[in-house]
Amino acid sequence: MGLLGELLGRVLIEAGGAELLEDVERLRRATIALRERPTESRRRAVTRIVAALDVDRAALVARAFAVYFHLVNLAEQRHRVRRLRELGRGVEPVPDSLEAAVGSIRAREGDEVLADVLAHLEITLVLTAHPTEARRRAVAECLRRIGGLLGRLDADPPRAEREAIRRRLLEEITILWRTDQIRRRRPSPLDEVRTAMAVFDETLFRLVPSAYRELDRALGPDSGARPPAFGAFLRWGSWIGADRDGNPAVTARVTREAMAVQAEHVLRGLEAATRRVAGALSVSTRFTPATNELEASLLADERALPEAAEALRRRIPHQPHRAKLSLAAERLRATRLRAPGAYSSAEAFVRDLRLVQESLARAGAARLAYGELQDLRWQAETFGFHLASLEVRQHAAVHRRVLERLAPGAAASALELDRLARDGWPPSAPVEDQETREVLATLQAMEELQGRFGPEACRRYVVSFTGSAADVVAPLALARLAVPDGRLELDPVPLFESKRHLRAAPALLDEALALPGMRAWLERRGRRLEVMLGYSDSAKEMGFLAANVALHHAQADLAAWARREGIALTLFHGRGGATGRGGGPTNRAILAQAAGSVAGRFKVTEQGEVVFARYGDPEIAARHLEQVTSAVLLASTPQGEAAARAGEERFAGLLHEMADVSEAAYRALVQSEGFAELFRRATPIGEIEALRVGSRPARRASGRDLASLRAIPWVFAWTQSRVVLPGWFGLGPALEAGIRRAGLSELRAMHEGWPFFRSLLENAELSLAMADLGIGRLYLDLGGRPDLAVRIADEHRRTLDLVLEVTGHDRLLADRPVLRRAVELRNPYVDALSFLQARYLADLRSGRLAPEQAERVARHVLVTVNGIAAGLQTTG
C-alpha cells in the first residue's frame, strides 16, 4: 500500500494543496493515537479536529479517506493474489483446493465414492441486484484499471515500463479522486444488467474452463489428452432484470431486454472463442482424417450457409475439422443476428463440438479433442445461448390479489388452482388492472424467451413469502391463463423466510405435491424440486443466532423429507453479503450445512459488492470457485454427512434451547418502545434510502416502520453506525444460558466438534470485530434513548467476553490472523470517517440547518457512507 498511499498523497496536494493533505494526516494521526490508547482526552482531540473543519472541507477529507479505502482494497487483493501464487508453487496441495479435496476423498472413501459424487455434482451461483454495491460503475471501472496496472507491476517490468505504469497510476488515481462517488440518479434494472455483464465478459466466461480444468487435473494425469470424468456442473443464474418483488421498475419488457443483453454477450463470446479454436486447428485430412459423421454434418452446414462454405473450401481445403468449427462460428453469428443458418439451440452447437471431438479422437488426436476444444465445449454447456438463467421472483401476496380478481375465492384453494393449472381456464373478460396485466405479461415473456433460447433460459419462478400450498401452485395456474397451450415450462420455487414457514415447509410441500397436477409436474421434472431458504428476512425477524438455527433445522427437515419421498432436492440459499444476512465464507458455510442437505447440489445467491469482491480479479475468482466446489464435494460424501450428523445428534437440542433465549432477547430489544425511533436517529438509514445504490426501493411498501424496511438497508445502517447489531445481538444471552444448562466444556466441545456451530461463532467474531461501541456510542447518543444505548453497549461487552470464553481465544479472530490484522489496520481510518459521519448526522438531527444547508450536509453523509462501506468491505 506504500506506493498507492504515496501517489494518493501527491494527488491530494495537486488537487487541494498541501493544506488538504495535512488536514487528512492530522485526523489520521489522531484516530491512530486513539486506537493505541483509547482515553477520553484522545477522543476529545479527534472530536475537536472534526469540529474545526467547515462542512465542505470535512467533505474533502472524507472523500480522501474513501478513495484511500478503495486503494487499500486493491492492494489487499493483489497481496492475496501473490499469496495464492506462492501457495501454488509448493509441493503439497493448497488447502481447500480441488486437489486436496479429491485426495482426501480418495484416501478416506475410495474412487467409487468420488465418482458417485462427481456424477451428481451441480453448483449454481445466482447474481442478484440487491442494493449492496455502493460504488458507482465509473468508480468500479477505474479501480479495475488500477488493479490491472498493479498486476503489471507484480511482473517486475523493466525500469522504463515501471515509470510508465507509475505515471498511469497517478493519472487513474487522479480520475478516481475527481469522479463523483455518489450517483446522481438511481440505476435502472438494465443498468444493473450491463454492470453484471462486465463480470461475465472480463472474468467468468474465461474462468469457467480453468475451473473445470483444475478438477480434471486433480483427478489424474494427462488432463487434455483424455475425456473428462465429469460433466459441466457449474451454472449461472441471475435475478437482475427478473426480480420484481417490490421493484416496480422490473417489468416484462425489462426481463425481455435483460435476456437480449445476456444473449448478445454470450453469443459474441462463443463466436470469438470458436473462431480462435478453429484458427489454431489447422490439421489436414492427410494426417487426421474426418469421420463420416463429421463429413455428413459439414455437407448439411454447406447447404445452410453456402457462401461461407464456398469461401472456406477455397481458403482451407482438406481441413474438415477447422472448416466445421469455422462454420459453427458463422452459425453462432447468424443466431445472434437471427439470420438464416442460425442454430436451433445451444444443444445443437454442443452436438457439433462433440462431433469434432469424436472425429479427432478416432483419428488419434485425443490431445486436440480434449484441450482447447474441450474448454469451448465447457463454456457452451455452462452458459448456453442465454449466459445465465433468468429467475423471476414475485411476492406471494401479489399472486393472491391477482387471483382474487380473476377467480374470486380460488386464490386460497390449492385444489382449485391445481385444477386451473391442469385443465385450463374458462373464457373470461379482458384483464383491466395494471398489476394483473403485468403478472400475465411476465409469464408470456418467459415463454417467448424459452422459445428462442431454450427452457433453461427462464423457467424458475421464485415465490417470496410462500405460506401455503396455494402459493406454490399459483404461478402454474397463472401460467396456464397467460399461455393457454401449456408450452411454458415453469418451475415454481417456494421461498421460505419466516420462522413459522420454515418450520412448516415439509408439511406444506406434502400438501402441494398431493395435488394431481403438482404430482404430474414433479414426474415430468424427473422428481427434481428446488426450495429456497431466505436468510435476510429471517435474521431481521428472529436475530442472528435464532435465524441460523431455524434455517439449519429447516435444511435437515427438508433433506429428510426429500429422502423419504424419493425427491432430488436442491436447496437454494438466499445468503447476503453481511453476516447479519447469512453472509460469511461460502466454503465454510457449505461444510456447515445440515447432514444430507447438500448431496452434490448447491445453489446460492451472490449479491452486490460480493460479486465484485469474488469475481473482480480472475485469480481470486478461480480460488472462490475452487473452494466452493471442493466444499460441495467434501460435504456430499458419506463421511462428510456422518460428521455433520454426529454434531447434530449430540448438540442440536442444546442449541435449540439457546436459540430460543437468543430470539427472546433480540425481540425484547427491537420491539421496545422507542427502538424504531432510535434506529432512525442513530443510524444513517434515511440517508441510505436516498443513496440510489440500486433500482429496487429500500422498502417493500410505503411507511416508515421497521416491518416495511428490507433486510439489506437494516443491516447496512447498523454497519455504518459501527454497532453491527444484526450480526451478534442475542448471542450473549444464548451462550450464557448454554453454559448454565450444560457447562462451558460442553459449549467448547460443540465449537470444536460441530462445523455448523463453529461457523456461527466465526461469523459472530467477525461482526464483533467490525463493531466498535466506543464509536457506536457517537451514533447511539443521537437516538434520544440512553437506556437502550446502554443496553446495547452492555450486551456487546457481554457477548464479546462470552464468545472468547467459548472459543478459548484471547482475542477476536485469533485463529484467522490475516483477517484480524486487516481489520486492525483499517479500524483507525474507518474511525476517521465515522467521526465525520456522526458529526454530519448530529447536525442533521438537530433541526437547526436551513433546507439548502441540510441538503448539502446530507450529500456529504453519502460520501462517508461510501467510504465506510469500502473500509469495512461490507454494506448489507
Image (spheres, rainbow, N blue to C red):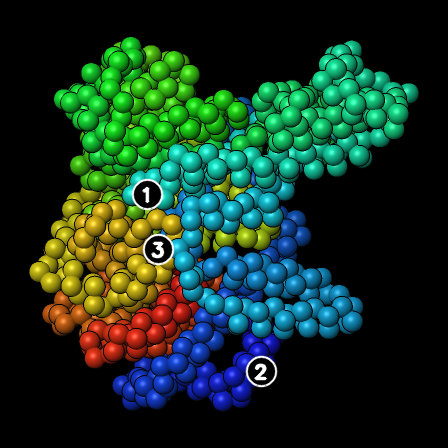
Mark 1 residue element: loop
- Residue 373 lies, in percent from the top left, at 71, 30
Residue 397 relative to residue 190: left or right: left
- Mark 1 belongs to which amino acid? Pro
Q: Which mark is residue 248?
A: 1
Q: Is residue 839 above or below residue 665?
A: below
Say which amino acid is labelled 3: Gly
Say which residue label 3 marks: 876
CA separation, marks 1 and 3? Answer: 22 Å
Going 20% across and 76% down the picture, which residue do you hit? 847
Q: Between disc 1 and disc 3, whose residue precedes?
A: 1
Q: Is residue 434 above or below residue 856?
A: above
User: Mark 1 against mark 2, which lies toward the viewer?
Assistant: 1
The correct choice, above or below, for 227 with respect to 51 in the image is: above
Residue at coordinates 14% horizontally, 67% vertically from top-left?
A: 788
Q: Which residue is mark 2?
A: 14
Judge depth for marks 1 and 3 and give the one in front: 1
